[in-house]
Amino acid sequence: MVTATHTQPHRADHDLGRDSDHNTTHDTVSLFYVVPADQLVPDLHPRLGAFRSGEHVFATGYLVGLLEAPCLTYLRRRARAGQAPVGTRVKVEHRAPSIPGNRLHVTARCTVEDRSRFVFAVAARDQHGLLVADGHVTTHLVDTTTFRARLRHRARDRPHLTDTSR
């Protein structure tokens, strides 16, 4: 459960007169999240046996999504009509386990803005200040019309991939 979201703007590079198409920003978005009992390793991909017998700790897959969340919040606030954020790269170190009930403070600081590409330094700490995860997330703001047209084209070229009847 997300308990709060906070944005802290600081645009020092604009003050330095750098080119607006390629600059470094220092905008931070943070949120608090309580680890639920249904996002543990056995809950991730329950059809795959590799996960079913895993430890009952917050799954890395869910943690990656949680680290992306403030990045998406940041970009949705900046997106123009017809744009949406799409993640393209995640490089994260999962440093400590979390159990249900742990309260995580997740932060994302935009460190690079290059036209439609944004790089974020992300981190999650538990209620005791222990670093649970850190790394970088790269996300692009895409034109939704173009993006969806490409998806439709791919689906037409590979109809077997969209068959959900199995």
Image (cartoon, rainbow, N blue to C red):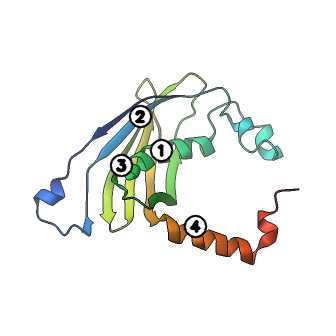
Judging depth in this view, the residue of 154 and 50 nearest the camera is 154
Q: What residue type is labelled 3?
A: Arg
Q: Which of marks 4 and 2 is nearer the N terminus?
A: 2
User: Separation of disc 4 and disc 3 at Cα?
Assistant: 21 Å
- Image quarter where the C terminus lies is bottom right
Specify the label residue 148 is tagged with: 4
Q: Which amino acid does label 1 sit on?
A: Ala
Residue 143 pos. (x, y %): 46, 67
The residue under the point 37% across, 60% down is 118
| Viewer-side label of 1, 4 | 4
**Lateral position of residue 19 relative to residue 65, left or right:** left
**Lateral position of residue 4 relative to residue 66, left or right:** left
| Viewer-side label of 1, 3 | 3
Q: Which of marks 4 and 3 is nearer the N terminus?
A: 3
Residue 133 pos. (x, y %): 48, 42
* CB atoms of marks 2 and 3 within 8 Å: no
For this orientation, the residue located farthest to the right is: 166
- Residue on which the image places disc 1: 69
